[in-house]
Amino acid sequence: MRSLRVNLSALPARIVIGDGRVDPALTGTDALTGQSVRLSGNYGVLYDLEVNGASGTAVALSPRGGLYRGAMNVQDGPITQTIKLPRTGNALKPDEPVLLWRPQSDRLNIDFVPSSGSNLPISLVFYRARTLSGFGGLIKTYQP
């Protein structure tokens, strides 16, 4: 498991996942051979992200390594939801981020395992978001 705790101070901000430098591959010991091994791509690793200062932002996923398709569990205050990324099709182009979530609370938790068949690295990009006028305090959740 890889736990990341992030405090947003300046926007836009970016969290890089699975690039081998900012987020290096995990190392460990092979249970059968006892040899040291490196888990290239961090596939099968549970990422536990806690982002503080997320209120008033929009979070997007940018596929930096090619095709990406998967699921993430998002906890935003009282809301907990599992979402598909992207909602339909595949995320392919790094210059076309896919909207992930618009946090309502200051602390956002995102848990996911990089999906098999998808390419890393990915970036989670946080942008300043405008307040929605006429929202009326209504909370709408994503329905896959």
Image: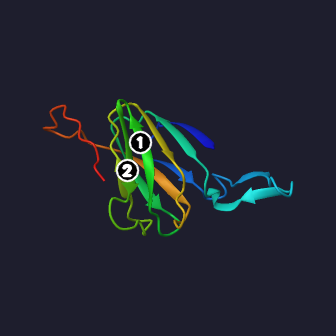
Q: Is residue 105 left or right of residue 15?
A: left
Q: Residue furthest front?
A: 32
Q: Residue furthest right?
A: 34
Q: Is residue 93 left or right of residue 115?
A: left
User: Residue 102, percent across and down?
Assistant: 32, 43
Locate the N terminus by quadrant.
Answer: top right
Seen at 54% across and 63% down, the residue is 116
In the rendering, which numbered label is found on residue 74? Answer: 1
Numbered circles on residues, count: 2
User: Residue 93, percent across and down?
Assistant: 42, 69
Quadrant position of residue 114? bottom right
| 123, 26: nearer the viewer | 26
C-alpha span from label 2 to label 1: 8 Å
Seen at 44% across and 62% down, the residue is 69
Seen at 27% across and 42% down, the residue is 141
Numbered disc 1: secondary structure: strand
Q: Is residue 74 left or right of residue 17?
A: left
User: Residue 81, percent across and down?
Assistant: 37, 42
Q: 10 Å neighbourhood of mark 2: few (<14), some, or many (≥20)?
A: some
Q: Mark 2–mark 1 contact, CB under 8 Å?
A: yes
In the rendering, which numbered label is found on residue 83? Answer: 2
Query: Residue type at mark 2?
Result: Ile
